[in-house]
Image: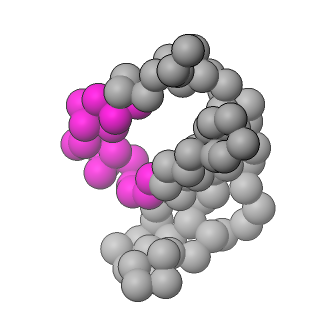
Amino acid sequence: MKENKIKPKGDAVKSDIEVNGLKATLFRYDATDEDGDTILEFLLIPANKRVVLITLWGSEAERDANKADIMAIESSLKPIN
């Protein structure tokens, strides 16, 4: 984040969500980076005694342009039973 000059504009909005049947916690920040306004997200997914952390940031336009890739990553997350 430091390399990309990402700076939150305020406090995170915390949401409990579900991704492909996995309970997760999402922290979303309005932020800025070297290109201007951006959205920064941390997705935490409990995995036994560990946590999987996925970080995503980009402007609305960048997110829209990469929506298929973002959805592919989300759909690849699956519980192991």
Query: Horizontal placement of 23 versus 64: left or right?
Result: right
Tell me if residue 28 is in the magenta stretch: no
| Any part of residue 44 in sight | no
> What colouring method underlies this structural image?
one colour
Position of residue 41 relative to residue 3, above or below, is: above
- Residue drawn at x 72%, y 42% as measured from the top left: 49
Residue 14 at what x, y percent from top left?
A: 75, 44
- Residue drawn at x 49%, y 54% as measured from the top left: 55
Which stretch is magenta? Answer: 56-74
Query: Horizontal placement of 46 versus 43: left or right?
Result: right
Of 73 and 49, nearer the camera is: 49
Residue 30 at what x, y percent from top left?
A: 60, 59
- Residue drawn at x 43%, y 28% as measured from the top left: 77
Position of residue 74 relative to residue 61, above or below, is: above
Position of residue 24 relative to residue 31, above or below, is: above
Residue 23 at what x, y percent from top left?
A: 67, 25
Of 2 and 63, nearer the camera is: 2
Position of residue 76 relative to residue 70, above or below, is: above
| Any part of residue 62 in sight | yes
Query: In the rendered view of the protein, which quadrant contains the C terminus?
Result: top right
- Residue drawn at x 39%, y 47% as measured from the top left: 60
Query: Horizontal placement of 45 versus 57: left or right?
Result: right
Tell me if residue 57 is in the magenta stretch: yes
Q: State the predominant SS element of the stretch in magenta.
A: helix
Marker count (numbered):
0
Of 35 and 72, nearer the camera is: 72
